Amino acid sequence: MFVSQEVPGSKELRAPGVRVVAQISVSAGMLICMRTTLNLNDELMRKAKKAAAESGVTLTSFIEDAVREALVPQPAKPYKLHWRTHDGTLAVDPADRDALYEFLERQS
């Protein structure tokens, strides 16, 4: 038996004109597989098929890998510290802990 239904919340997550349908195969109460129908741009589909063939993988594996890679959280942009200097020297001697704390208190 196959059950097809529109995926809840899929309207907010997809590009205009793309319909997402989940199709689940159920046999004797056990979940066997899940199928998803995507309507992709023809040019995008041709490029995906070509890239999958060149990589020696199935189109399904290629698309799974692409989606998996797209869902990996991107690292935050590293913070770059900008030292303030006066006449080419530091405003405070960083080796003098008390002077450094005093300077930081004045800055806040």
Image (cartoon, helix red, strand yellow):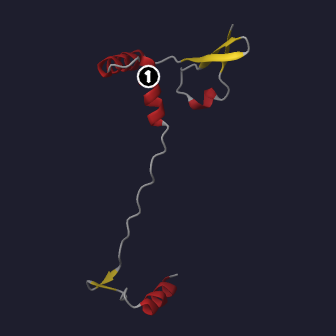
Q: Is 17 or 89 nearer to us in this picture?
A: 89
* Picture coordinates of residue 32, whole percent (x, y): 63, 16
User: Residue at label 1?
Assistant: 61
| Residue visible at 49% across and 44% down in the picture | 73
| Residue visible at 69% across and 16% down in the picture | 30
Q: Which quarter of the picture shows residue 4?
A: top right
* Picture coordinates of residue 75, whole percent (x, y): 44, 50
Q: Is 3 or 15 nearer to us in this picture?
A: 3
**Left or right side of 64 for 11:** right
Q: Residue furthest right?
A: 29
For the residue marked with disc 1, what is the amino acid? Ser
**Left or right side of 52 for 69:** right
On screen, residue 46 above or below 69: above
Circle 1 residues within 10 Å: few <14, some 14–19, many ≥20? few
Q: What is the total number of numbered labels drawn onto the structure image?
A: 1
Looking at the rendered structure, the secondary structure element under dot 1 is: helix
Q: Quadrant of the N terminus?
A: top right
Q: Which quarter of the picture shows residue 89?
A: bottom left
Q: Residue furthest top?
A: 1
* Picture coordinates of residue 60, whole percent (x, y): 45, 19
On screen, residue 99 above or below 24: below
